[in-house]
Image (cartoon, rainbow, N blue to C red):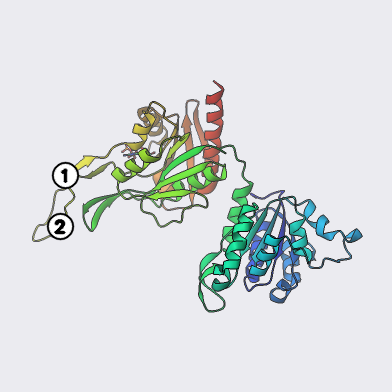
C-alpha cells in the first residue's frame, strides 16, 4: 500500500487512451490512494463515468456547474484537499489549455486552481505530438513545473506508429509512487553499478556472470526516489534505465572500472551491485577461435581490478556499499567480505534465492551486526537498503 493516505484527483480528457485510465484508476486504488475522478465531456464519449465510479468507489465529476458542490465552487473544492492531480490521457488540446491557463470546463478549472503538483500523461497522434505548437506547449508546461510522463513510442490507435502513446498504467503508478517517497538524499550524488560484466575470449565469445541487473536497477531507482542525482554504470542487461537516472553502458570489468573512476567525483555514496567477473582471459583473440580437431582447450585468465575495494581505499572515499551473492555460509562470508573490502555496509543474499527473480531476501551487515530485510520485491528491498544508508550517513555526519 505504497500510496496509502494519498489523495489523488485523476482527470481524463478525450482520447482513445481513456480506456487505459480505468486500469490506472484501479492501480492507484490498489496501491491505497483515495482517487477522485473528473472527466471532460469528450472523455465521457470514450469511457463512461459509471466505470470510473465503480473502480474508485467515488462519485465522478464532469460538470463545472454541478449542483452537488455548494456555492458553485466545484472548481476549487474538488482539488483543494488533493496531494496530486494526474491527467491521463492528456490530449493535445488539454495541454494547450493548461499551458495557456485556460479554464473553460471543470477539469481545466481544477487544474488552474490547484495547490498540489500536476502530472500529465500525454496521449495523441504522432503528428499532433510532434507539431511545433504541442512541443512549444510541452516546454512551457515543463518550465511551469508540470510533470510530463511520456508519451512513449509505438503503434497508435489511428494506425500510425511513433511518439504519442500514453504510458502504460503500471508505469504511471510507479512514477506516482516514486514521487511520494521521502527525499533524504536530495542534493547528493549516488553512483551505482549493476548487471554482469562480459570478458571477451574472442570477438563472438565471452565469459560472464549470471545477473539480470534487476537488483542494481532497483537500487538506482530507490536512490533516485530518495532525491539523489544517480549515475548508473551498467553491464549488458535487458532493462530500461529508471526514470531520471543517468546510465553509462559498459561491457567488461575494465570498462566498468574506467566509468566508475570517471564518475566518482563528488559522490557521497557508491553502491556496488554489479556481478563483476573476477577474472578475464589474459589475451582476447582478435579473430574467432576455431575449434579445429581439438577436444579440449585451455584458457589462461588474469585477475580483474576489484572496483569496490579500490573505491573504498580512496582518500576521500564515498560511503561504500557492497553486495555479496553467496551459495552457502551467508553470515560468515558476508562478515569476512565486509572487512576484507574495508566497507561500512554489505548487503548479502543467497544467490539461489535472488537470481533472475523479482524478489530477494537481503540481510545487511554493518558495524552493529546483521539486519534481515525479510523477503520481498527487489524494489522494496532496495528502498529499505537506501533508508539504512541514509540513517548510517546521518550518524556518520553527526560525529
Ligand atoms: N566487486 C567489484 N569488482 C570486482 C569484483 C567484485 O567491485 N572485480 C564488488 C561487487 O560489485 C560486489 C562485491 O564486490 O559489491 C562482491 O565481492 P566479491 O568478493 O568480489 O564477490 P565474489 O566474486 O562473489 O567473491 P568470492 O569469489 O570471494 O566469493
| Residue for point 56% across, 28% down | 394
| Residue for point 56% across, 23% down | 398
User: Which residue is denoted by mark 2 in the rendering?
Assistant: 289
| Residue for point 32% across, 50% down | 251
Q: Is mark 2 within 8 Å of ligand 1?
A: no
Mark found first going from the N terminus, 1 or 2: 2
Residue 347 lies, in percent from the top left, at 45, 37
- Residue 376 in sight in this render: no
Residue nearer the viewer, 347 or 353? 347
Q: Quadrant of residue 141?
A: bottom right
Residue 32 lies, in percent from the top left, at 68, 53
Residue nearer the viewer, 335 or 121? 121
In which quadrant of the rendered image does the C terminus lie?
Answer: top right
Real-space Cα distance between discs 1 and 2?
14 Å
- Residue 391 in sight in this render: yes
User: Which residue is denoted by mark 1 in the rendering?
Assistant: 300
Amino acid at each position: 500500500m505504497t500510496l496509502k493516505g494519498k489523495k489523488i484527483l485523476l482527470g481524463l480528457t478525450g482520447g482513445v487512451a481513456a480506456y487505459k485510465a480505468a486500469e490506472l484508476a484501479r492501480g492507484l486504488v490498489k496501491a491505497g490512494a483515495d482517487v477522485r475522478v473528473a472527466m471532460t465531456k469528450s472523455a465521457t464519449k470514450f469511457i463512461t463515468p459509471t466505470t470510473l465510479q465503480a473502480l474508485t468507489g467515488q462519485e465522478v465529476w464532469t460538470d463545472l456547474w454541478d449542483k452537488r458542490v455548494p456555492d458553485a465552487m466545484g472548481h476549487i473544492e474538488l482539488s483543494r484537499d488533493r496531494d496530486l492531480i494526474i491527467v491521463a490521457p492528456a490530449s493535445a488540446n488539454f495541454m494547450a489549455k493548461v499551458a495557456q491557463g485556460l479554464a473553460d470546463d471543470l477539469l481545466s478549472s481544477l487544474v488552474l486552481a490547484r495547490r498540489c503538483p500536476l502530472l500529465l500523461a500525454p496521449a495523441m497522434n504522432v503528428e499532433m505530438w510532434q507539431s511545433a505548437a504541442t512541443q512549444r506547449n510541452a516546454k512551457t508546461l515543463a518550465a511551469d513545473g508540470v510533470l510530463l510522463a511520456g508519451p512513449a513510442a509505438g503503434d497508435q490507435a489511428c494506425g500510425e506508429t511513433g511518439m504519442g502513446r500514453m504510458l502504460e498504467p503500471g508505469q504511471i503508478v510507479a512514477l506516482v509512487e516514486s514521487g511520494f517517497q521521502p527525499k533524504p538524499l536530495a542534493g547528493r550524488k549516488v553512483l551505482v553499478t549493476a548487471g554482469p560484466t562480459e570478458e571477451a575470449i574472442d570477438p563472438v565469445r565471452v565469459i560472464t556472470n549470471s545477473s539480470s541487473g534487476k537488483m542494481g536497477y532497483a537500487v538506482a531507482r530507490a536512490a533516485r526516489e530518495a532525491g539523489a542525482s544517480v549515475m548508473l554504470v551498467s553491464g549488458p542487461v535487458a532493462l530500461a534505465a529508471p526514470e531520471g537516472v543517468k546510465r553509462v553502458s559498459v561491457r567488461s570489468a575494465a570498462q566498468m572500472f574506467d566509468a566508475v573512476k570517471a564518475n566518482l567525483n563528488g559522490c557521497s555514496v557508491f553502491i556496488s551491485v554489479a556481478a563483476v567477473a573476477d577474472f578475464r582471459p589474459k589475451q582476447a583473440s582478435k579473430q574467432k577461435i576455431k575449434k579445429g580437431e581439438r577436444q579440449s582447450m585451455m584458457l589462461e585468465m588474469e585477475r580483474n581490478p576489484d572496483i569496490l575495494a579500490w573505491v573504498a581505499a580512496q582518500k576521500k572515499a564515498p560511503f561504500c556499499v557492497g553486495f555479496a551473492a553467496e551459495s552457502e555460509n551467508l553470515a560468515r562470508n558476508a562478515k569476512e567480505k565486509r572487512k576484507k573490502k574495508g566497507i561500512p555496509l554489505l548487503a548479502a543474499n543467497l544467490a539461489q534465492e535472488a537470481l533472475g527473480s523479482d524478489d530477494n531476501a537481503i540481510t545487511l551487515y554493518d558495524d552493529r551486526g546483521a539486519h534481515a530485510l525479510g523477503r520481498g520485491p527487489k524494489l522494496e528491498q532496495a528502498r529499505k537498503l537506501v533508508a539504512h544508508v541514509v540513517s548510517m550517513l546521518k550518524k556518520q555526519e553527526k560525529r
